[in-house]
C-alpha cells in the first residue's frame, strides 16, 4: 500500500457507486463496492511494481477529480461530424460521451434481430431485462460485470466506477458482416471517464467490433476503460481499438478475452494520440485449436508516453498465437512494449510467435521493449523478436534517387513501416481512416494521402 | 552530357576510384566493363549521389552543372537515373505509391501537370506490358520478396516511366534469363534517342549482344585503362581482363 498521502484518498470516493447505474440493484452495488475496496487497498500502482516499471501513473492519484461526471456535456461539432460520417457508412454505431450513451448520435436500427447491442447502464439499472427469453439462460450480464480482472488495479477501479458502455450479445451462428462501431468521445474539462464493454460471442458467431476513443480538446481527461470479450467455440471476433485521445489526456485500458475451442480472436490496437496511454490486452486460449492474433501500432511524438502490455495464456493444447507490434517514436516520446506469453503445462503443441519492431525518428525518443516467454509444456514452437532502429539509409537513398525529397522519402518509409500493421485490418473504411491518421502525423503526409 | 575528370573516390580512407576520366555525349551508349571489385558500382552510386563516399579529387559535370554539388533528388529530377545492382526492398510501400510519388515530383520539375489516377494507371499498364509484367505488380510492395529477375525488371519499369536523360544501368543483366534479358534490352533500346545517354555497367559481354554500345571502357582498379568500340567487348570476352591489364602495365612501364 502506498504510504504517501494521495489526494484521491480524501475524496470520499467510496460513495461514488451510490450515484451510478444499478445503484438500487443490491448485487450491482455490492460488486461496485467490493471492487472499490480492492482498488483502495492497493491504490494506484507505483513504478516499484514490475508491471509499471516504465510507466509513471502517479499524476492520476493527484487529480482533483476521479469520480465520473453524471451529466455529460454536449460533444464538439467535430466529434458529432465523425459520428454522422460513421453512421452514413452504414455501420452499427453506439456513441458514448464521457462514458454515457448518447442515443441521439447512435444508429443501431439496422441490426439483425438475434443480435443484442445494448447500453450497459440500461442493463444494470433493471435486472428484469435479463429474463428476456432471448437471452440464453447461461448468459447473465451481471456475471461478466462482476468478473474480477486482477491484471491491473485499474480494472478494479473501472468495476467500481463504470458508468456505461456497450453490451453485445451474438447468438450462436450469427454472422454479422457490417462492423459494430463504438465511438467514445471525451468532452468537457478534466473529466474522469469509465467505459465498460462486454462482448459475448455465441458458438460459431462472427463479428467485427471497433472501439474508437477520441478526444479533441487539450484538457486533462482521464479515461479508464475495460472491455471483456468472451468467445465461444468456433466463434470469430475481430476487435480494433483506435486510440486518438487529446494531447493532454490519460488513457488506461484493459481488453480481456477468453477463447473456447476453435475460436479466433483478432485484436488490433492503434495508439495514435494521448499524453499517457496504456493498454493491457490479454487473452486466454482455453479451448484446443483456438487462435489469436494481437496486432498493434503506436505512433507517438513530443513527450507522449505509450505502454502496451499484452499477455497470452495458452492453456489448452494445440492453440496458436501471432503477435505483431510496431512503434514509431519521434520527439521525446517514450514507448513501452511488454509481451508476455505463458504456455501452461497442458498446452502441448502450442505455436506462438511474437515480434515487436520499433522505429526511432529522433535521438530523444526511446523505447523499452521486453518479450517474456514462460513455457511449461513440451513440444511447443515459440519465437520472438525485437528490433529498435532508425530509418534505413539504403532505402532513403533509393527513394531519393527517384526524385523524392528527403523529408517525403522519410514519411513514405515510415508509412510503409506502419502499413505492415494497418493492412492487417479487414475493414476497408477503418484501414483508410488509420492510414490518414498516420499520414496526418508525418511531414508532407498530405502528399502521400493524395496518392494513395 | 556527362564529363568526369580525374575522379578520386575513397570509402573509409580506402581509395576505390583513382583518377577516372569519362566523357559521355547525348545520344551515346557507353559500356563500362571490369572485373568484380574494380569500382563500377562505386562510380554508379557516386554519380547518383549516394552519401558515405569521400570525393578526394576531381569533378563531374552533368549538363553544365556541378553534379557532385547536387542532392540525390535534384539529380534525379534533372534526369539522372540509376538502375541499382541491388534494388532495395521497401516493405509496406506499393509500387504504385512509390512510382506515383516519384513521377509526380519529376513532372512538377519539368513543368508538367500531375497525372490523375486513371492516366497513371494507363501509363503503367502500357509500360508493364512492354516488360511482360503483370498488373498485380502495382499493388505489391517495392521489391519485397521479389525474385532477382523481378527486381531488375522493376528497375527498368521505373526507368521507362520516369524517362530520364542519363541512364546508368548497374549490372541489370545479372539474374535475368534470356527471355527477360531480351525484354529489358528492347526497353533500353527503345529509350535510345539523340537527347539521351546510356551507361551500361556490366562484367559480361552478354547484354552487349542486344544493346550495342558506341563505346566500351575497361575499368580496372579504379581507372579506365582502355576504351574502344563494340569490338572491344568481344575481345574481352575472348581473352579476359588479364589481357588488357598486361597491355596497360607494359604501356606504363614503357
Ligand atoms: N561500402 C563499402 N565499404 C567498404 N568497401 C567497399 C564498399 N563498397 C565497395 N567497397 C569496396 O570497393 C571496391 C569496389 O567495389 P564496387 O564498386 O562494388 O565494385 P564492382 O561494382 O566493380 O564490383 C571493392 O573492393 C569493394 O570491396
Ligand atoms: Mg557492382
Image (cartoon, coloured by chain):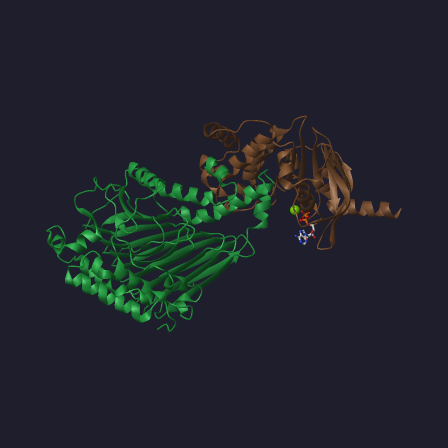
Identify which residue is drawn at 47% across, 60% down.
A386
Identify which residue is drawn at 25% across, 58% down.
A261
Q: Nearer the viewer, residue B113 or A234?
A: B113
Colour representing chain A: green
User: Is A131 above or below relative to B6?
Assistant: below
Looking at the rendering, which quadrant does residue A310 occupy? bottom left
Chain with brown colouring? B
Percent of width and height locating residue B230: 72, 34
Whether residue A348 is visible to the viewer of this picture, yes or no, is no
Percent of width and height locating residue A159: 26, 61
Q: Nearer the viewer, residue A63 or A291?
A: A63
User: Is B218 above or below relative to A190?
Assistant: above
In which quadrant is the C terminus of chain A drawn?
top left
In which quadrant is the N terminus of chain A drawn?
bottom left
User: Is A269 above or below relative to A36?
Assistant: above
Identify which residue is drawn at 11% across, 51% down.
A132
Amino acid at each position: 500500500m502506498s504510504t504517501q498521502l494521495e489526494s484521491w484518498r480524501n475524496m470520499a470516493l467510496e460513495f461514488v457507486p451510490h450515484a451510478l447505474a444499478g445503484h438500487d440493484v443490491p448485487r450491482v452495488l455490492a460488486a461496485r463496492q467490493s471492487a472499490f475496496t480492492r482498488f483502495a487497498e492497493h491504490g494506484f500502482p507505483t513504478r516499484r511494481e514490475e508491471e509499471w516499471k516504465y510507466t509513471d501513473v502517479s499524476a492520476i492519484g493527484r487529480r482533483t477529480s476521479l469520480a465520473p461526471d453524471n451529466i455529460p456535456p454536449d460533444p464538439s461539432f467535430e466529434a458529432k461530424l465523425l459520428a454522422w460520417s460513421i453512421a452514413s457508412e452504414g455501420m452499427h454505431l453506439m456513441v458514448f460521451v464521457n462514458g454515457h450513451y448518447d442515443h441521439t448520435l447512435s444508429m443501431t436500427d439496422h441490426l439483425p434481430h438475434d443480435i443484442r447491442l445494448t447500453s450497459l447502464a440500461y442493463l444494470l439499472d433493471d435486472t428484469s431485462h435479463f429474463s428476456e427469453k432471448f437471452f440464453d439462460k447461461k448468459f447473465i450480464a451481471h456475471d461478466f460485470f462482476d468478473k474480477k480482472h486482477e491484471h491491473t488495479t485499474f480494472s478494479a477501479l473501472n468495476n467500481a466506477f463504470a458508468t456505461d458502455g456497450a453490451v453485445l450479445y451474438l447468438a450462436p451462428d450469427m454472422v454479422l458482416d457490417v462492423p459494430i462501431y463504438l465511438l467514445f468521445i471525451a468532452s468537457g474539462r478534466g473529466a474522469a471517464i469509465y467505459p465498460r464493454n462486454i462482448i459475448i460471442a455465441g458458438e460459431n458467431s462472427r463479428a467485427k467490433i471497433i472501439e474508437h476513443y477520441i478526444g479533441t480538446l487539450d484538457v486533462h481527461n482521464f479515461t479508464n476503460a475495460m472491455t471483456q470479450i468472451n468467445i465461444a467455440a468456433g466463434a470469430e471476433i475481430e476487435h480494433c481499438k483506435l486510440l486518438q485521445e487529446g494531447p493532454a489526456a490519460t488513457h488506461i485500458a484493459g481488453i480481456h478475452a477468453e477463447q473456447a475451442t476453435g475460436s479466433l480472436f483478432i485484436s488490433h490496437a492503434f495508439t495514435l494520440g494521448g499524453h499517457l496511454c496504456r493498454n493491457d490486452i490479454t487473452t486466454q486460449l482455453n479451448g484446443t485449436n483456438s487462435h489469436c492474433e494481437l496486432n498493434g501500432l503506436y505512433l507517438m511524438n513530443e513527450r507522449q508516453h505509450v505502454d502496451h502490455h499484452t499477455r497470452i495464456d495458452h492453456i489448452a493444447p494445440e492453440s496458436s498465437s501471432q503477435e505483431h507490434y510496431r512503434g514509431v517514436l519521434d520527439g521525446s516520446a517514450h514507448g513501452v512494449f511488454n509481451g508476455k506469453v505463458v504456455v501452461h503445462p497442458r498446452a502441448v503443441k502450442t505455436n506462438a510467435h511474437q515480434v515487436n519492431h520499433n522505429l526511432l525518428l529522433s535521438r530523444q525518443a526511446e523505447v523499452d521493449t521486453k518479450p517474456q516467454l514462460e513455457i511449461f509444456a513440451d513440444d511447443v514452437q515459440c519465437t520472438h523478436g525485437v528490433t529498435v532502429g532508425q530509418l534505413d539509409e539504403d532505402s532513403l537513398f533509393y527513394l531519393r534517387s527517384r526524385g523524392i525529397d528527403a523529408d517525403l522519402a522519410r514519411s513514405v518509409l515510415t508509412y510503409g513501416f506502419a502499413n505492415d500493421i494497418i493492412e492487417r485490418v479487414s475493414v476497408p473504411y477503418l484501414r483508410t481512416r488509420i492510414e490518414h491518421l498516420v499520414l496526418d502525423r508525418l511531414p508532407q503526409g498530405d502528399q502521400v494521402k493524395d496518392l494513395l | 552530357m556527362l564529363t568526369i575528370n580525374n575522379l578520386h573516390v575513397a570509402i573509409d580512407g580506402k581509395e576505390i576510384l583513382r583518377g577516372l576520366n569519362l566523357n559521355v555525349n547525348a545520344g551515346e551508349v557507353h559500356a563500362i566493363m571490369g572485373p568484380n571489385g574494380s569500382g563500377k558500382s562505386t562510380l554508379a552510386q557516386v554519380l547518383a549521389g549516394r552519401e558515405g563516399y569521400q570525393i578526394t579529387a576531381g569533378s563531374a559535370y552533368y549538363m553544365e552543372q556541378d553534379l557532385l554539388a547536387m542532392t540525390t533528388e535534384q539529380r534525379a529530377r534533372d534526369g539522372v537515373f540509376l538502375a541499382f545492382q541491388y534494388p532495395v526492398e521497401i516493405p509496406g510501400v506499393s509500387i504504385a505509391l512509390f512510382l506515383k510519388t516519384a513521377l509526380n515530383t519529376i513532372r512538377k520539375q519539368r513543368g508538367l501537370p500531375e497525372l490523375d489516377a486513371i492516366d497513371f494507371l494507363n501509363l503503367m499498364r502500357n509500360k508493364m506490358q512492354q516488360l511482360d509484367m503483370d498488373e498485380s505488380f502495382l499493388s505489391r510492395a517495392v521489391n519485397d520478396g521479389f525474385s532477382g529477375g523481378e527486381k531488375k525488371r522493376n528497375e527498368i519499369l521505373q526507368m521507362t516511366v520516369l524517362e530520364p536523360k542519363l541512364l546508368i544501368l548497374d549490372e541489370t543483366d545479372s539474374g535475368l534469363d534470356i527471355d527477360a534479358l531480351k525484354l529489358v534490352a528492347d526497353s533500353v533500346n527503345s529509350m535510345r534517342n539523340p537527347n539521351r545517354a546510356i551507361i551500361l555497367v556490366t562484367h559480361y559481354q552478354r547484354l552487349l549482344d542486344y544493346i550495342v554500345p558506341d563505346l566500351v571502357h575497361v575499368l580496372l582498379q579504379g581507372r579506365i585503362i582502355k576504351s574502344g568500340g563494340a569490338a572491344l567487348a568481344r575481345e574481352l570476352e575472348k581473352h579476359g581482363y588479364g589481357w588488357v591489364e598486361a597491355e596497360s602495365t607494359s604501356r606504363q612501364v614503357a
